[in-house]
Structure formats: structure tokens, C-alpha cells
Amino acid sequence: MKADNDYEVYVTTIVEKYSDMIMRIAFTYLKQHSDAQDVCQDVFVKFFKHAKIFEDAEHEKAWIIRITINTCKDILRSFWKKRFTPVEQVIQPITDPQDHEIVSMVLELPKKYRIVMYLY
Amino acid sequence: MKDNYIHGMREIKADSSLKNAIIQHSLRSRHAQHSRPHPLFKLGIAVISLVCALTLILLAVPDVSVQKHVISGGSSPFGRLAITAYASNGTAIDVEANVEFPLGTYQLVMSSVPGFPIRISAQGADQISLHTSDGEFILWSPTAPKVIYKGQNIQIEPGKTLYWTPLIGKAKSEISEHARIEVTTHNHDQSIQQDIIEIKRDDQYRYTGKWLNSSLNK
């Protein structure tokens, strides 16, 4: 019982710590909120499945960033992404018009620059 | 500008429902892992089941002539319905009646196919109709890569490959987790046989199929 409780606390901590970061990286890559949510779920499935031992917090964060980017690339390479483009425009949950405009401009950049902008 | 970008990106975050779903899924997966039987036990059961199945087949149907994808000698005058499905590596897997079979696995991120591939053949039938409860059927050919959406109902000739996709909705943004496909074979507008294929998605977001033979040997 204690082990189950400890694991639940561990899972909750990890999800709270990294879910927003994963969403932002995925959104930067894929420009779709729903796709970013799928990536977020996939990354945590992989994280808890492989249960890697990390040297420190930075190592853990770097691993998650790498897995997120690779998952985004897999989706971009998928059959549907190659052949199907969503009809609706990119929807950003950003309320401030000026912030929205700046983020939109960054999202227009090639993805190798977009992700660097975010990680910096 | 930098502050605008930072403020804007801070509004992009995982909502509480998503976080809860991820946490619950992780806890369920861990519980499922601990409940799994030992791999050697599963292997032993699989070997014993295979030996029993082969023994029954050899004893029960010694005169069956197995043709490509079709097993003759069933109670239906048009031969038994056989399904060929394709694993993720493209290997064709022949399926016999009344046997649970692996259709391979399909994931949405696969770039080589537009959906879960299924090929249905039936000796003596001139048409096969299918209806799916969820998802949609697709016709597609690697040589002419145009995707043709056929909706939830389709009629095809035996031997033709079709695909099932879990993507639904006008924008193809919703994803089905499972589907029940009714398969009916016809000959000169007469329904001969009806079967069911069940497609389900597991925790790893992989789709697998199961054929539930319903009317053979009636």
C-alpha cells in the first residue's frame, strides 16, 4: 500500500513538473493543441514504461525534451500528416492579442528555429 | 517582444483533465504490469494450445484441401470465409475459421499505411459488404496513393484490400478506441455468411483485431 502511494506521488510530481513543458514543445513543433495533447500522453507513457535511472534533474529533463521532439517528428512523418492538412487555422489558447501575434510570428519560422527559440 | 513570447507560451499548458488522465493511465499500467503472468507461463500455454489445435485439425479434417487463403469443406456451399490481414511489417497472415488471430498492430503514427489493413476473400462469393460501428473505411493503393474515404459502409470484391481508420469527425480530429465491423458475404444478392471483426486499442495506442466467427457451421 505504501509503495502504491509513493508511486502515485511520484507520478503526480513528474506529470505536474513536465506536462506544461512537453505541451509547449509539442505545440511549437506541431502547431495544433490536440496534437500536442497526444504527444504529452505518449511521452509520459514512454517515460513511465522505460523507468530510466537519471543522474540528475537536468539529465531527466533533457531525456524528456528529446523524447518529446522525437515523438513530434514521428507524428510529422506519419501518413496522415504528410497527406492531410487541417482545414482550420492554428488555434492558440493565448488571450493577449500582442502575445498571440508574437507567438504566431514565431510559429511561422522553420521548425528548427522555432524549437531553439522556445528552449532558449 | 521576448516578454510577449514568454507570456504567450506560458498560456499553453496541460489542463487538469489531461494531467489526471495521464496520472490514472500510468497507475493503471503499473497495476497491469504487476498482474501479468510470468512470460514463460504464457509461452507454455501458447505452445500447448498450438499443439492441441494442430492435433484437432489433423484428426478432424483430413481431406481438406487448403487453397490460397480459403479452406474448403465447411458446411457452407461457398466455402469458409477466410481473412488475410497484414502485420505491421507487411507479412500476410492467413486466418482459419473459429480461431482467434493476430492481425498485427496498427498505430496512427505509421507512415506506410493509411489505416488498419484487412483483406477478405471468400470462394464463391461475389461481393463482401462491411459496416463499422466506429471509425471509417478507406480504399488506398501504394501505386496510386490517393486516399478514398468510404465512410462506415463499404462493398468490395473478394480479395481486395481495404483499410480501417480510427479517425472520425469532419476534421478527422477525433479518434475511436474500438470498433465492431460486421462482415457479410453475398452471392447474387443473397447474404451467405455474417461475421464480426472487433478492433481495439490498447494502452500503448496500438490497434489490434479479433475475428469473431458467428455463422459458420450453422
Image (cartoon, coloured by chain):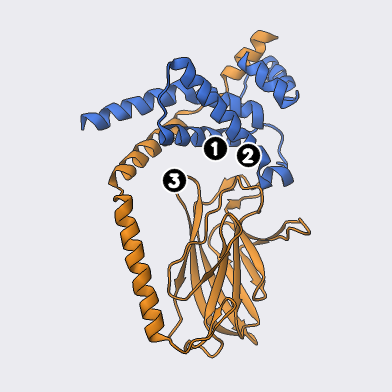
Element type at marker 3?
loop
Q: Are marks 2 and 3 on the same chain?
A: no
Q: Quadrant of residue A113?
A: top right
Give above or below for A57 relative to B182. above
Quick check: can you spot residue A96? no
Element type at marker 1?
helix
Q: Which subunit holds the residue at mark 3?
A: B
CA gap between label 2 and label 3 equals 18 Å
The residue labelled by disc 2 is A75
Q: Are marks 2 and 1 in contact (CB under 8 Å)?
A: yes
CA gap between label 3 and label 1 equals 13 Å
Residue A38, which numbered label?
1
* Chain appearing in blue on the rendered image: A
Quick check: can you spot residue B175? yes
Q: Which subunit holds the residue at mark 1?
A: A
Give above or below for B116 relative to B23. below
- Of tags 2 and 1, which is closer to the observer? 2
Q: Are marks 2 and 3 in contact (CB under 8 Å)?
A: no
Question: How far across and down, in percent of the image, does residue B19 sit?
Answer: 44, 30
Question: How far across and down, in percent of the image, does residue B207 sit?
Answer: 51, 53
Q: According to the rendering, which colour does chain B have?
A: orange
For disc 1, the neighbor class at 10 Å (few under 14, some 14 to 19, many from 20) is some
In percent of the image, x 52 and y 61: which residue is there? Answer: B103
Residue B203, which numbered label?
3
Element type at marker 2?
helix
For disc 3, the neighbor class at 10 Å (few under 14, some 14 to 19, many from 20) is few
Name the kind of residue labelled 1 in the image.
Asp
CA gap between label 2 and label 1 equals 10 Å
Question: How far across and down, in percent of the image, does residue B57 sit?
Answer: 40, 80
Q: Quadrant of residue B43?
A: bottom left
Q: Quadrant of the N terminus of chain B?
A: top right
